[in-house]
Amino acid sequence: MRLMSAIALLFYFSTGQVSDGYVIFTPQEGGGGGGGGSSATTYLMDTDYNVVHTWSHSRGPASMPYMQTDSSIIYPYRVQSPTMTSGGVGGGVQRVTWTGTILWDYTVADDDYQHHHDIQPLPNGNILIIAWERKTASEGYAMGRQTINNSLNEMWSEAIFELNPETGEFDWEWHLWDHLIQDISSSYPNYGVISEHPELFNINLGDVGSGGGGGQPNADWMHFNAIGYNMDLDQIVVSSRFHDEVFIIDHSTTTEDAAGHSGGNTGMGGDFIYRWGNPQNYDRGSSSNHILGDQHGVNWIPSEYPGGGNLILFNNFHSNNTSAIVEFTPPLNPDGTYAISASEPFGPTSTTWTYSSGSSMYSDVQSGAFRQANGNTLITEADDAQIFEVTSGGSIVWNYTQSGNNVMVARAQKYSPDYLEQGEEISVDIDHEPFWNLVGLPANVDDNSVGTLFPDAVTGTLYEYDQAYISVNELTEGKGYWLRFSDVGTNTVSGESFTSIAVSLSEGWNLITGPSFTAVIDDPGGIVINSTLYGYSTAYFNVDELEPGKGYWVRASGDGEVTIVAP
């Protein structure tokens, strides 16, 4: 851990307790919502302003990185040549280990789709990605759109993809184009009365991009800028800057259901099950109900936190050229739908909590807010590259500003001190042969003595290796061991799982083991000699992966550290 001497710190404390944890963020040079495409650095900082770790990137961020429990990050970034350019353009998503190795890297940037802004990691390991979807002017007019006023003669709609990083395929997808309505003529598809269909979006709302003028032309119609996920409800929330609304859709659908108007837990297919912020978009309510303005960063407050289940966001144009944090309580029904009267807009009519520091807080790009476990809220004001934490009463208890020329921070998030240590209970069966076996410890256990873990092993035969064999009685994560058995059999080790572990190697041969799952060696320093990873089962055999509970020999060209990580 080192002090962040190269970066200016502006901070002060007030009454209240700062929430403990680690703040992660990626500054972006060049400012503006379009993002800088040059290299960038992600920082992990503690509440004492010490930089705990950094990651270097060859491309600038599209929004913010997401920390994983194995210490890797999911990083959305701006590709070299995006197919449509507007604020928050991205195009790439990659997973980067603690030591900087890229485990996978995918792009969504082709003639049909262009990722932008945000992503959302899911509990199953998949990634939700928001993307612009190209439609020609002819396609737009055929759906009842009346004007398309950009020089590209295009209309980029929105789509959401669920990427499976293991296969590189999309396991699920949703397209706004399947959920439109128009009231121009029955000769066009989706004709209806707008106010009678809040579950659909009026294709004639708003402009479609810009003609260019002094800048680059684009065909951005909706400008989704954030995506969030509620695991308890299996629902997705997105935010549209250009239409001052947030929308919730049902993720429990199949892709086929998501293209229609029925199916899923709510029975509404891929239609909007809730929307809020500007009900005049569906011809209900009045200007007094138009609460949101160019908002960003919508997300659900975790159920166990104060305000759990509410939505919170950064409202960029709140009032009088100032920004505010807005928390509100959706009218959730027991069945996962949302209450709405026949002719009234979705509630609520007012916010649950609002924070605004007047003219001192204003950003016209990105920005965000995340509730903390102690009730505080972590706020990012992107324009000023400022990250600060406030109590429910509005007192600032932590404040950091990133220095630099024309620098912005899209959003920052904070993770609890034990976030990287959390794991699920797991049981690993470890088979053994008679005589000598190479074994390891595949879980965090309360009792790591060899007699407890391997009760049928021959007493006094556990050996580690450190330039010579050493007799030991306990096993340590990351180390491999020789252990002798009299007969063939299986031992089951139960404990808390872990997905990666840092292991120190010495020049020459080393005995190692991996985490709770099949793993590979992440070797950024290149000290592991090629083709020198060996397992043993009555004879040595060359391997590329480490299985949980097994020990392995590996040869290093020098002293150093590697990370053994489950992909």
Image (cartoon, rainbow, N blue to C red):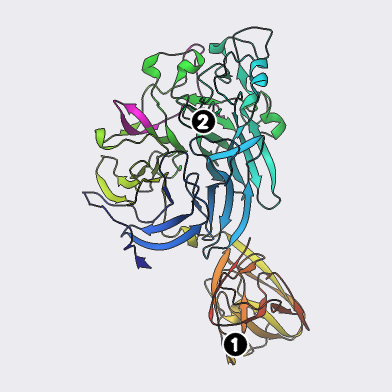
Q: Quadrant of residue 182?
A: top right
Residue 531 is marked as: none
Q: Type of residue at label 1?
A: Tyr
Q: Type of residue at label 2?
A: His
Q: Quadrant of residue 171?
A: top right
Q: Which residue is mark 1?
A: 465
Q: Which of the pair 269/60 is nearer the observer?
A: 60
For the N terminus, the image quarter is bottom left
| Residue at position x 61%, y 10% in the image | 192
Check if residue 320 falls in the magenta segment.
Answer: yes
Question: Within 10 angstroms of label 2, few (less than 14), some, or many (20 or more) residues?
Answer: many
Q: Position of residue 19 (x, y in %)?
A: 33, 52
Query: Gap in Å between the C-alphas at discs 2 and 1?
Result: 58 Å
User: Is 136 located above or below residue 60 in the figure?
Assistant: above
Q: Position of residue 472 (x, y in %)?
A: 56, 87
> Which residues are the magenta region?
316-345
308 left or right of 83 in image: left
| Residue at position x 40%, y 43% in the image | 31
User: Is 280 located above or below residue 399 in the figure?
Assistant: above
Q: Position of residue 194 (x, y in %)?
A: 55, 12
Q: Position of residue 287 (x, y in %)?
A: 38, 15
Q: Which residue is mark 2?
A: 223
Magenta residues, dominant SS class: loop
| Residue at position x 51%, y 30% in the image | 223
